[in-house]
Amino acid sequence: MQRDGTSGYGLGDVDTVISVDDVAREAAALSAGAPPVAELDALAGDQPLVAMDNLVAGYGRMEILHGLNLRCGAGQSLCLIGPNGAGKSTILHSIYGFTNIFSGSISVDGVDVTRLTANQKLRDGGVAYILQDNSVFPDMTVEENLLMGGYLMPKPADAKVAAERVFEKYPRLKERAKQPARVLSGGERRLLEISRALVMDPKVLLVDEPSIGLEPRFIDMVFDILGGLQQEDGKTILMVEQNAKKGLEFADIGYVLVSGALAKAGRGSDLLDDPDVGRLFLGG
């Protein structure tokens, strides 16, 4: 909706509505205090598993990320929040190899993975990407979907063994192994997408909008699953989440992005209490 040239959602009254344009303007003002790399290192325990250094990246010739730095330690979770178009998903895409890297570097566990392909990052770099969109093959069985996660393994038998390990971890999927994926609930489909990424036993999970399209009753289930992967299995999780409050409640670290640059970083719990973050991104 537009009123007097200002775009917004048209919800609430004139005293409570903050327009999309106002959010963008005020968020941009935050970037003046971008945190130094030493602060990012400290948040990651000074031993980052995933690191971006001065990354400039985008699509085609278009530059989206402008000299971005990022740090996330082993077994930590990091949530990226910010206005639409801030470059949040582009960070995940860049780590996984879906963008053009113009300059800067990305490393995982001390190994430079900047120029590796997506397949190389999954097979050799220990990085798996869980897509934002529904990526389940509806006419394939749950087991067949799961086996697709092992397509880079040397032998089909290896994928079968890995899939059985996942079934042992998530009995609700094992019960439906021979059923077509289309019969799964929204939460079960998301569980299958996450589980398929686990077949290659990655160190790092890139999770794009885990709650998108889910009924509220399934959202907590999905975050419980991700929490178990972090706390029990030691996975490192980098996440973009449209529900900023839910994402920051989950994450050890939060980054606020504005226009392809890092504007603010802190512990997730600290950003939840930050008045600027609350007003602009948390609805209060």
Image (cartoon, grey):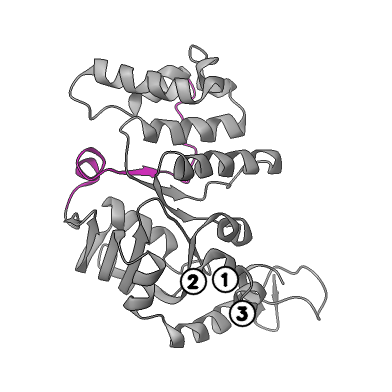
Look at the image and say whether residue 137 sits in the magenta stretch: yes
Q: Quadrant of residue 165?
A: top left
Of the two numbered discs 1 and 3 on the same chain, state the one appearing first in sequence.
1
Q: CA distance from mark 2 to mark 3?
A: 13 Å
What amino acid does circle 3 point to?
Asp
For label 2, the crowd category at 10 Å Cα-Cα, with few meaning under 14, some 14 to 19 and many 20 or more, is many
What amino acid does circle 2 point to?
Gly
Q: Secondary structure at mark 1?
A: helix
Tag 2–tag 1 contact (CB < 8 Å): yes
Relative height, residue 199 to residue 257 (above, below)? above
At 70% from the left edge and 84% from the top edge, which residue is drawn?
Answer: 4
Q: Quadrant of the C terminus?
A: bottom right
Residue annotated with mark 3: 276
Residue annotated with mark 1: 271
2 or 3: mark nearer the eye: 2
Residue annotated with mark 2: 266
At 32% from the left edge and 72% from the top edge, which residue is drawn?
Answer: 68
Of the two numbered discs 2 and 1 on the same chain, state the one appearing first in sequence.
2
Q: Secondary structure at mark 2?
A: strand
Magenta-drawn segment = 116-140
Whether residue 140 is visible to the viewer of this picture, yes or no, is no
Left or right: 243, with 95 as reference point: right
